[in-house]
Amino acid sequence: MNKITIGNSRLESSRFIYGCMRIAGDNSASDRDKGKIAIQTALDNGYNHFDHADIYGNGECESLFGELLAEKPSLREQIILTSKAGIRSKSNEHNSYAPKRYDFSQRYLINSVEASLKRLNTDYLDMFLLHRPDYLFDVEEVADTFALLKASGKVRHFGVSNFKPSQFDLLQSKASMPLLVNQVEINIHNIDTLLDGTLDQCQQHNITPIAWCPLGGVAYSAWGNTFTPEDESRIAQELAQQSKKHNCSPWQIALAWLLKHPANICPIIGSTTPERIIAAKQALALDYSREDWYRLLEARNGQPVP
Ligand SMILES: NC(=O)c1ccc[n+]([C@@H]2O[C@H](COP(=O)([O-])OP(=O)(O)OC[C@H]3O[C@@H](n4cnc5c(N)ncnc54)[C@H](OP(=O)(O)O)[C@@H]3O)[C@@H](O)[C@H]2O)c1
């Protein structure tokens, strides 16, 4: 698998990252077995970077991965482990309703990282990302938290997820280390990051954009998707034509479309189906042209660019 250097670091990541959000499934024994096979398939096929979050499967996804690391401790040094925190589920705190919320307070983030390390059976994360911007985030407090986590050896590198360029700049202005990545939704249906300056900022400062839900509405009905059936059929038709031309599947074209962007987008592959985890790699070898790229954009927009 092609490798890429993450931001201004020495981390050599596979171009496709394996996403662990679905590996525990419904937490049944059969789903957990399927998840383990998916991780092993990813490892056998050159994925060396695994994306987690404390909330995936309520912690079960990290625990499942931790079981694998406990069985094979030598694996730890061969892979890049990323996890995220900052989203809290609704709960009852001191007998009063606490809604779903974001929390970048020092105590919460440090506790979350420590809990992730325990579940993952490791003593460090290669990267820790803030999952979604906390409206109440105190930049000095977060910068201090990052410095503490780094000094303790619990986290080696830092980044963010779902940050707008202004939020990224704000945190970078106080953080004592470079923020290496912004993990954002990018797919043919959701092109916000092409329009709001996120990908420009990534190119300018050598920040690695990591794409979550890279297939978006191509593989399944994505949340927040407001496309009409006519829009969907135009996109599907163009994908079908291009996949015929490139002798591959439509969803592999959707990945090639992301790879073409000069910001060096790293898609996260979230399938738990071994055949798809393997087949995704074909997208890396496609000779995908500027014209193909704009044809698909035109089909998405329903009109040529101005
Ligand atoms: N930072 C964030 O806010 C955020 C948010 C969401 C996700 N993420 C990360 O991004 C990763 C990827 O997200 P994702 O899992 O939504 O991405 P995805 O790779 O776009 O979608 C995976 C889903 O699509 C299905 N799928 C894949 N190829 C398919 C095909 N050809 N036909 C039909 N279904 C297909 C998979 O089913 P099968 O498993 O059955 O193949 C799976 O349910 C996650 O694992 C997580 O690590 C981050």
Image (cartoon, helix red, strand yellow):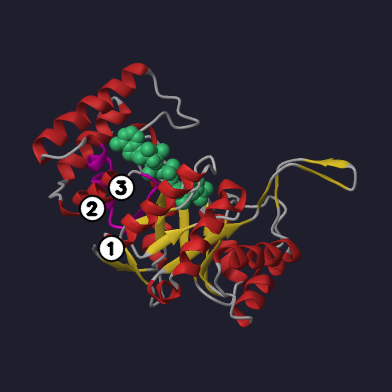
Quick one: label 3 or label 2, which is nearer the N terminus? 3
Image quadrant holding the C terminus, namely top left
Write down the residue under mark 1.
Answer: 46
Q: Is mark 2 within 8 Å of ligand 1?
A: no
Callout 1 amino acid: Gly
**Circle 2 sits on which residue?**
281
Q: Could you tell me residue 22's position as x and y percent?
A: 47, 45
Mark nearer the N terminus (1 vs 3):
1
Label 1, secondary structure: give it: loop
In the figure, 228 relative to 98: above or below? above
Residue at image position (14%, 30%) is: 241
Residue 188 showing in the rendered view:
no
Where is 6 relative to 184, above or below? below
- 213 with respect to 289 (left or right): right
User: Between residues 270 and 76, which one lies in front from this camera angle?
Assistant: 76
**Left-right relation of 134 to 234:** right
Residue 203 picture location, percent across and down: 36, 61
Q: Quadrant of ligand 1?
A: top left
Dot 3 falls on a residue whose secondary structure is helix
Name the residue located 43 percent from the left edge and 71 percent from the top edge.
Answer: 72
Instruction: Identify the secondary structure beneath mark 2.
Output: helix
Is 271 included in the stretch rendered in magenta? yes
Identify the residue under disc 3.
Answer: 274
Occupied quadrant, residue 266: bottom left
* Alpha-carbon span between mark 1 and mark 3: 13 Å
Image vertical order of residue 219 relative to residue 252, above or below: above
